[in-house]
Amino acid sequence: MTSIYDAMPIKVLEELERIETRIPVIERRAFMLQAEAQDLRYRHDEIIASWKARAAWEGLDNLVEQRHREDAIAWACDPLPSGIPTQ
């Protein structure tokens, strides 16, 4: 019995073989990337939940004030990107 593969030149059959061998590799990589994305989503949600809990405990306004104080200190004390201190 004759099949479509019998009509294809060797070059085409070799290309098909290359494609068939790459498919599982790429599918595995996609699976790993999906798992990594899911881990990042979980970590993202975990960070937000922890800050919401902290805000409920300490008060959102207090956290905002604390951030402004820390930003002001960092602006005055941290070196510029060139490594030269601001003072």
Image (cartoon, rainbow, N blue to C red):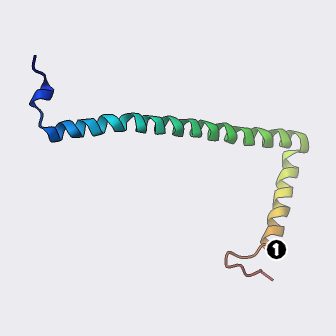
Left or right: where does residue 30 sit relative to residue 51? left
Front residue of this view, candidates 7 and 61: 7
Secondary structure beneath dot 1 equals helix
Residue that carries the numbered disc 1 in the rendered image? 77
Asked if 1 appears above or below 71 in the picture, the reply is: above
Q: Residue at point 47% right, 35% down? A: 28
Q: Position of residue 37 (x, y in %)?
A: 57, 39
Q: Position of residue 20 (x, y in %)?
A: 31, 34
Q: Residue at point 9% right, 30% down? A: 7
Quadrant containing the C terminus in the rendered view: bottom right
Q: Position of residue 17 (x, y in %)?
A: 26, 36
State which quadrant residue 19 falls in: top left
Quadrant containing the N terminus in the rendered view: top left
Q: Residues within 10 Å of mark 1 (few under 14, many from 20)?
A: few
Left or right: where does residue 46 sit relative to residue 38? right
Q: Residue at point 63% right, 41% down? A: 40
Q: Residue at point 11% right, 28% down? A: 6
Residue type for callout 1: Cys
Q: Position of residue 53 (x, y in %)?
A: 83, 38
